[in-house]
Image (cartoon, grey):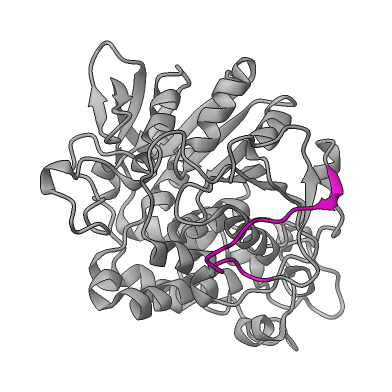
Amino acid sequence: MIDLIIDTDSAIDDWWAILFLLMHPEVNVLAITVVATGEAHGLAGAKNIAKLCALVGKLDIPIAYGQAKPLSGDNAFPDDIRKGVDRMMRISLPDHPNPCIGDNAVELLRQTLSRQSATVLAIGPHTNLAKFCKDHSKLWSKIERLVVMGGAVKAGGNIKILLPNMRDEDDVAEWNIYCDPLAAKIVFDSGVPIELVPLDLTNDHPIKPDFVDAVNARREYPCLDFVAQTFERIRVEWGDNVADNGCYYWDIVAAFVVLLRSHVSSDVKGMTVDETTGQIIVGAAHQSVKQITSLQLSNAEFIEMYLGVFKPLCLPKPAASSSVATSALAPASVFFTSADDDGRSPQPSGRRPAESLRTAGYSAGTFFSGVLPQPPGRRRAQSLGLQTSSSVTLDDPAGTLPTSSGGIETPSLSASNSSAD
């Protein structure tokens, strides 16, 4: 079992990866921190992550977002991109019934890592992690592995795609590093064991029509119906060329690296980050970083590994004369193993398809027979010593944040983000 903390900017490919990890039987997600200097704004991104947790019935995972300003500079995603992910691409999911959302990601990291060591998956800018490294250096060693999706080593950058006025020679970075290059430099220079998943690797894993077709063929699974809707919204918002040629597995590759240590090739190099441009600088004088250079999965295995974890969500109806067998509730194998199983398990009798359930506002616990619903209380939050009775507000001059009736309850975290907006 891998004890995992996810640090995310709550973007589309993050959603795909997070759903996979939440469902994987060998992953125990301890906490999710949202870095507010990436694609999503802090509170909006955290609320969207809470919806994904609710979608799979994981109601007690604590979530917190960090400061809104990078440690240096003002590099940022275009406003229209940020508004889109804040609104979850206008995809409707039921709200988490009782979300545990805090406004101090660094404090949630501190409280989680003070209790145990963990792997950290960083799939956004490094603002939260750099502040945690600086403020709580004695706990930094509790990070057993830091798997980073970010950077471009020999590959070109991907900034100009969204900022077309950038000069070609300046396009040397990847967005997760570019948004807060000083924070990335602090993390790279810290000596934490980094496993880097750069554009050099993810460029070899474009999303092809067969993956989209496979997801669409399994839309009776609510998680995969959500993933299918993200592809539809990408096509509507950004056009056919982006939908057909501009999407990569990015954060899913990083999620696979967390799990498949025996299926990767790597090369250890000294690396740091230019704190102005976000360019990865390679040199023997810098801290050693394990660059993941290949992921040894065929395209078919890649697709099956991703889709396979969602199989427990829809189970055949048990025989009326017998109780549900223990094996029926066991997690699915990582790969599909049945030659005649196309992944479309029959819907239990009397249950409506995922689409009607979603629009009717059903929560995960009322439908998913393969996920035992957890109480709506704050079990893990309470185990971390967090208070859950206070509320938080966030200035939203652009009017981009999703609305919620009754406000958002959050943990009262003892430290504050002194530099947050």
Q: Does residue 28 appear in the picture of this structure? A: yes
Residue sitting at x 36%, y 16%: 287
Q: Nearer the viewer, residue 18 or 273?
A: 273
Q: Nearer the viewer, residue 126 or 314?
A: 126
Q: Which residue is farthest front? A: 397
In the visual, does 237 lie left or right of 21? Answer: left
Q: Nearer the viewer, residue 292 or 179?
A: 179
In the visual, does 222 lie left or right of 159? Answer: right
> Where is residue 378 shown, x and y percent of the image?
84, 50
Based on the displayed image, in which of its 4 quarters is residue 230 positioned? bottom left
Q: Is residue 79 magenta?
A: no
In the visual, does 26 lie left or right of 235? Answer: right
> Where is residue 352 shown, x and y percent of the image?
69, 87
Residue sitting at x 78%, y 58%: 326
Q: Nearer the viewer, residue 249 or 158?
A: 158
Query: With respect to residue 119, does 150 lie above or below?
Result: below
Residue sitting at x 47%, y 66%: 83
> Where is residue 286 shown, x and y percent of the image?
31, 15
In the visual, does 34 lie left or right of 323? Answer: left
Residue sitting at x 30%, y 44%: 174
Based on the displayed image, in which of its 4 quarters is residue 111 positioned? top right
Q: Which residues are magenta?
A: 387-403
Q: How many numbered discs?
A: 0
Based on the displayed image, in which of its 4 quarters is residue 393 positioned? bottom right
Q: Which residue is farthest top? A: 285
Quadrant for the N terminus in the image: top right
> Where is residue 97 shown, x and y percent of the image?
79, 66
Which secondary structure class fits the magenta region best?
Answer: loop
Q: Does residue 336 appear in the picture of this structure? A: no
